[in-house]
């Protein structure tokens, strides 16, 4: 018997028992929808968390710190120097090493003042950060002088110098300062500044440090009250910052820099941290461990992501198992439907056997009916799943949770849902089909 004949007979048989077929397909629809929605929820949550973390840090970066910056007694060869940068660049799987030099300075403009968290980085690394620009441009190595790029939230930290009142944090009002055009005087030597301010009470005269008028290169785009990974910093080109610090402090110890045991400064300026870019994510953890074995304080987002992904995979498996319960119920319903169909078609089976129909064809007919129920249920269930996913995502987005689409149906799940529901239908129909094969032809005819 041809396959097309078996298919026609299967469809005809199912059509004769429309109500039972529809109810059975409904069970498959519910089961398929449950699995797809549950798995897509787990997948969406996992991808959403990964995307959110990628906005703060690259998953292929390792950050290396030195205890010297925290006052720890560290040997000079363990300090983050240019020689160490070259050593790390020569390591396997390292694409680039970007040093960062952090420095705090006091900024004054009119009646206002604030403390700037200055981050000196290379032009290349600054470009890779994809900082949105509202005005101006990012500082470059070709500027020939120190220029600042202000984060979007820096403006909120200005206070009235005489009263120490913070207009934004106390009244929600931004200070009347245009970071692009308003002159900004920067005091790098804060120790000397505060000593000069309070020296009159002690009878000692301390000369106030020089104020520097630093040009603004640009301002970051974004709302002042929306904190991001770079919004509270002031960025500049690292070599220009190093030259400026050397010029200002000369033979004095630079604040935040390690000193020798006798209190004298080193000849070189050491970096606050190094950012190591790795070629592939799977090489991040082994390289992080290598750096730790060398004695450096190294960490990466890949460690946190790996832990989070393990938890999300567990959640996704649990959600999938919950959906699988519904599919199990649907499979039992298919088996029950097919078993009832065999009892009602005993004479038909007997006649087919008497006429010499192949037992494989008889089994194939019932398996095809069961598979057809699973296939139709899977197709409709998949459509319902897409509808529910759209509704869930719309609800989450309208709620303002900021998580984006938390229900995402990947392409592989679309195909797997149809294949899985069809296979479940056929497996559920396997036992009834075997029973149909074992029926005695004469007994089947007499039974009718």
Image (cartoon, rainbow, N blue to C red):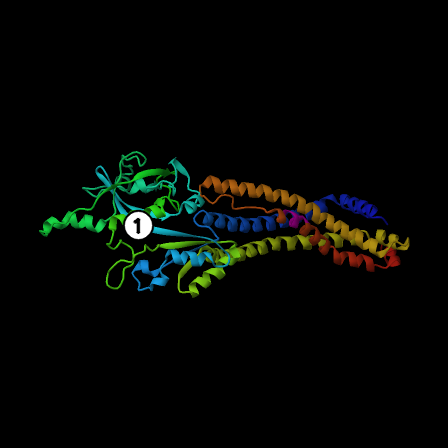
Q: x%, y% of residue 198?
A: 14, 49
Q: x%, y% of residue 52?
A: 46, 47
Occupied quadrant, residue 143: top left
Q: Nearer the viewer, residue 80 or 44?
A: 80
Report the number of numbered marks.
Answer: 1
Q: Is residue 310 visible?
A: no
Boundaries of the magenta span: 414-418
Q: x%, y% of residue 7?
A: 80, 46
Q: In the rendered view, does 342 fall on the left or right side of 192?
A: right
Q: In the rendered view, does 365 fall on the left or right side of 386?
A: right
For the residue labelled by badge 1, is the local secondary structure a helix, a strand or a loop? strand
Q: Residues within 10 Å of mark 1 (few under 14, many from 20)?
A: some
Q: Residue at point 63% right, 49% down?
A: 412
Q: Residue furthest left?
A: 203
Q: Residue at point 35% right, 60% down?
A: 79
Q: Residue at point 40% right, 58% down?
A: 84
The answer to whether residue 17 is magenta is no
Q: Residue at point 67% right, 48% down?
A: 418
Q: Nearer the viewer, residue 281 or 138?
A: 138
Reply above or below: 31 against 148: below
* Secondary structure mostly seen in the magenta stretch: helix
Q: Which residue is mark 1?
A: 103
Q: Nearer the viewer, residue 134 or 276?
A: 276
The answer to whether residue 415 is magenta is yes
Q: x%, y% of residue 119?
A: 35, 48
């Amino acid at each position: 018997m041809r396959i097309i004949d078996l298919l026609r007979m299967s469809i005809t048989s199912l059509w004769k028992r429309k109500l039972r077929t529809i109810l059975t397909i409904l069970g498959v629809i519910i089961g398929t929808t449950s699995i797809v929605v549950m798995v897509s929820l787990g997948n969406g949550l996992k991808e959403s968390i990964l995307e959110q973390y990628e906005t703060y840090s690259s998953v292929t970066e390792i950050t290396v710190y030195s205890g010297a910056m925290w006052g720890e007694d560290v040997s000079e060869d363990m300090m983050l120097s240019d020689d160490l940068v070259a050593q790390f660049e020569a390591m396997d799987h390292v694409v680039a090493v970007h040093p960062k030099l952090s420095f705090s300075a006091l900024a004054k403009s009119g009646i206002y003042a604030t403390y700037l968290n200055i981050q000196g980085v290379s032009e290349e690394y600054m470009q890779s950060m994809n900082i949105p620009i509202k005005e101006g441009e990012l500082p470059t190595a070709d500027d020939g002088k120190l220029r600042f790029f202000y984060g979007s939230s820096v403006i909120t930290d200005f206070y009235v110098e005489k009263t120490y009142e913070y207009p934004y944090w106390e009244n929600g009002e931004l200070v009347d300062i245009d970071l692009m055009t308003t002159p900004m005087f920067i005091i790098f030597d804060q120790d000397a500044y505060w000593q000069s301010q309070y020296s009159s009470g002690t009878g000692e005269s301390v000369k106030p440090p020089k104020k520097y008028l630093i040009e603004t290169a640009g301002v970051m785009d974004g709302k002042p009250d929306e904190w991001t990974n770079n919004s509270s910093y002031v960025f500049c080109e690292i070599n220009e910052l190093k030259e400026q610090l050397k010029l200002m402090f000369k033979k004095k110890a630079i604040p935040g820099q390690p000193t020798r045991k006798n209190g004298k400064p080193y000849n070189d300026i050491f970096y606050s941290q190094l950012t190591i870019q790795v070629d592939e994510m799977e090489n991040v953890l082994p390289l992080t461990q290598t750096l730790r074995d060398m004695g450096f304080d190294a960490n990466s987002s890949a460690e946190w992501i790996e832990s989070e992904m393990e938890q999300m995979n567990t959640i996704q498996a649990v959600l999938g198992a919950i959906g699988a319960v519904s599919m199990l119920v649907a499979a039992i319903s298919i088996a029950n439907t097919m078993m009832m169909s065999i009892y009602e078609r005993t004479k038909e089976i007997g006649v087919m056997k008497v006429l010499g129909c192949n037992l494989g064809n008889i089994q194939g007919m019932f398996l095809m009916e069961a598979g057809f129920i699973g296939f139709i249920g899977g197709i409709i269930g998949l459509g319902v799943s897409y509808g529910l996913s759209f509704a869930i995502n719309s609800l989450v987005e309208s709620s303002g949770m900021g998580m984006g689409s938390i229900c995402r149906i990947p392409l592989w799940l679309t195909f797997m849902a149809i294949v899985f529901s069809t296979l479940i239908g056929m497996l559920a129909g396997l036992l009834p089909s075997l029973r149909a094969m074992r029926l005695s032809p004469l007994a089947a005819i007499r039974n009718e």
